[in-house]
Image: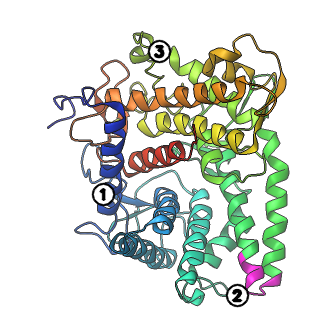
Amino acid sequence: MSAKTASRNVDIPFDTYLQLQYDFSLDAIQRAVSPAGAAKGAMQASPSRVHPDYFYHWVRDAGLTMSLVNQLYADATDQTQRDSWGTILADHADFSRRLQETDNPSHGLGEPKFNMNGSAFWENWGRPQNDGPAIRAYAIIEYGHLWAKQGGDWSRLYTSEWPATSVIKRDLEYTAHHWEEPSFDVWEEVSGQHFFNFMVSRRAMREGASLARQFDDTGASDYYAQQEDRIASRLDEFWDATKGYVTTTRNYHRGLGDKVSNLDTQVLLASLHASYDDGVYTPESERILATTEALIEKFSRLYAINTMNSNPSIGVAIGRYVEDVYDGYGYGEGNPWILATACVAEIHYRAVNKWLSSGQFEITSVNLPFLRRASQTLVNSLPLTMTADSDLRFRQIMKELKETGDTYMRRIHKMGRMDLNLYEQWGRESGQSRGAPHLTWSYAAFITAIRAREQLNL
């Protein structure tokens, strides 16, 4: 079936759809790694080779997906399934080391994508992209800890040898020495300093410092820790108190120059993928919630499929950023993205999970607009601290926030296809699937949102 003729699945009950799409998405990720005609360990962004051609291995996309696969590997109770995820992780690590040794136009580890056979992609592109090595580093570190529990040998992944020869240390060294330099962003369109890049670099440095200490690589550990502190000290530069949200880019260098709002979903992606349980730009933090609210407000008025929606149980379809002109095939008008919509759902779920576990949350002037949109109970609220023990409304508010997160998953359900194929985008007016089919990142974003939802004890 084509994207234009495929039947919608709205007649399938919501919870049934979520399970069907979740299972299909797990299978899709397994199919995306080492497909026919590709090197072992290569992960396709999409099987589409024309209009658009996404049959490439993106370092970022693969790293983010492998971070999810680490969780699936750790949680697997079926040995066959566990072995399958373990093979994917091992093959990705081996393939990553091969890519590190492949000459490319960036002449370094900041090269963003490679052909699926492992050869370099030599055409013009937005390069370097310095988030890729950072994400790959912490994803393989996660895998290393899991593998070591099964008796695996760390020397295959990390050694203190200098110059660096191991796959993890190469990426850590690159990140430690290049995080501050201008590079292209998640969408490969703007070069500068980006909140997303800083966040993933901070995570890589923190986990790298811990790993280096484990192996008495003291000089490296100290240096990585210093870089983590330096990055952390820079994060607040992205907060714009006047605009009321976390901006995405500072110190513009080159590339698209018309993102005047500097408001972008990649800020939320950074929080989901790279924050710690320390309140620093975590999903429940007031500045991330304020940024989420700003994005929802903008996109609610931008796309026809949102303005024509009168069903409050169907959430806003979310795009990348309001000035977007990439339509999935070329340049015209930007559209909502599945991964961005799932991202907003996950922000809600993760915030609720944190507040449920801590038994309290703080309503501030910064996060109040987000909370008022999500909870009817809080429409007339003023800033205050609410606890589960002292306020009977606490659990009701948590349910309302969870249900608001569900509205974004209901949007995916409403726009979904009977064949469960998650594309990159939906048409802003037609709602039809657009862009790359079977986008691996769309499947991964759906899975992480569902996993966050399943953790809620409501």
Q: Nearer the viewer, mark 2 or mark 3?
A: 3
Q: Decide if residue 219 is in sight here.
A: yes
Say which label, 1 or 2, has the lower sequence index. Answer: 1
The residue tagged with tag 2: helix, strand or loop?
loop
Residue 60, position as x, y percentages in the image: 51, 57
Image quarter of residue 206: bottom right
| Quadrant of the frame with the C terminus | top right
Q: Which mark is residue 242?
A: none
Name the residue tied to disc 2: 160
Q: Nearer the viewer, mark 1 or mark 2?
A: 1
The residue tagged with tag 1: helix, strand or loop?
helix
| Quadrant of the frame with the N terminus | top left
Q: Is residue 177 left or right of residue 8?
A: right
| Label 2: how many Cα within 10 Å (few below 14, some 14–19, many 20+) | some
Mark 1 to mark 2 CA distance (whole Å): 37 Å
Q: Main secondary structure of the magenta part?
A: helix
Name the residue tied to disc 1: 27
Q: Which residues are magenta?
A: 211-218
Say which label, 2 or 3, has the lower sequence index. Answer: 2
Tell me if label 2 and label 3 are in contact, CB under 8 Å. Answer: no
Residue drawn at x 56%, y 79% is 167
Image quarter of residue 135: bottom right
